[in-house]
């Protein structure tokens, strides 16, 4: 992790990572929900319902796990992280951004397979940005991503 946090990424990577983490703060997923409700066709309510349920379940789950694990963030341990992004909460494990990104991306992609590539690219970008910016360890985003996928598949089965 030290190498990642000491790495002086090229400007375009720094900009993309900051943009990806900000997109993962939630507003991009709200915008996606509105677009689907307007243009999503007959399965729009099921898709938005599935994604919303998976995201809300993920938020509830990561809130409990973070308080139980109390894992420090890499940016608190490695003070030389180049990022100056403020973390949304105190603890690191698991990555809430990754849970929600994968929960929404996979949920929507199950209903709209043609959107799968761009949505998964966005979810992976959000997860990678959390590591590059020093907000999470790799294990935080891997576990968060897996939780998000499991929640997405679970709620897809409920809503389809």
Image (spheres, grey):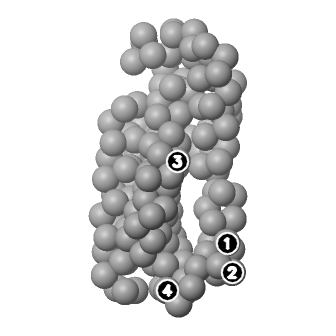
Pointer 4 or 2: first along the chain: 2
- Answer above or below: position of 13 versus 160: above
The residue at the point 51 percent across, 10 percent down is 7
Q: CA distance from mark 3 to mark 1?
A: 16 Å
Pointer 2 or 3: first along the chain: 2
Q: CA distance from mark 2 to mark 3?
A: 21 Å
Give the residue number, with chain letter if any, for mark 4.
Answer: 43
| Secondary structure of the residue carrying numbered label 4 | helix
- Residue 147, image quadrant: bottom left
**Around disc 2, counting alpha carbons within 10 Å, would you say few (fewer than 14), some (14 to 19), or many (20 or more)?**
few
**Around disc 4, counting alpha carbons within 10 Å, would you say few (fewer than 14), some (14 to 19), or many (20 or more)?**
some
- Answer above or below: position of 22 versus 80: below
Give the residue number, with chain letter if any, for mark 3.
Answer: 122
The residue at the point 65 percent across, 21 percent down is 12
Q: Position of residue 110 (x, y in %)?
A: 38, 70
| Secondary structure of the residue carrying numbered label 3 | helix
Q: CA distance from mark 4 to mark 1?
A: 13 Å
The residue at the point 61 percent across, 75 percent down is 36
Q: From where the camera sits, is residue 42 visible?
A: yes
Q: Which mark is residue 121?
A: none
Q: CA distance from mark 4 to mark 2?
A: 11 Å
Give the residue number, with chain letter if any, for mark 2.
Answer: 38
Rendered-image quadrant of the C terminus: bottom left
Pointer 4 or 1: first along the chain: 1
Mark 2 or 3, closer to the camera:
2
| Secondary structure of the residue carrying numbered label 1 | helix
Q: Are marks 3 and 4 in contact (CB under 8 Å)?
A: no
The residue at the point 31 percent across, 81 percent down is 157
Give the residue number, with chain letter if any, for mark 1.
Answer: 35
């Amino acid at each position: 992790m030290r190498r990642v946090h000491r790495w002086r990424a090229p400007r375009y990577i720094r900009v993309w990572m900051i943009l990806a983490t900000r997109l993962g703060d939630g507003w991009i997923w709200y915008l996606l929900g509105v677009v689907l409700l307007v243009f999503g066709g007959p399965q729009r309510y099921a898709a938005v319902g599935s994604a919303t349920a998976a995201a809300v379940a993920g938020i509830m789950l990561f809130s409990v796990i973070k308080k139980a694990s109390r894992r420090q963030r890499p940016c608190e341990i490695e003070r030389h992280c180049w990022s100056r992004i403020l973390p949304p909460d105190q603890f690191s494990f698991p990555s809430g951004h990754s849970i929600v990104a994968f929960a929404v991306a996979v949920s929507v992609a199950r209903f709209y397979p043609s959107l799968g590539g761009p949505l998964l690219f966005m979810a992976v970008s959000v997860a990678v940005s959390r590591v590059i910016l020093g907000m999470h360890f790799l294990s935080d985003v891997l576990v968060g991503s897996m939780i998000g996928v499991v929640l997405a598949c679970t709620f897809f089965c409920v809503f389809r």
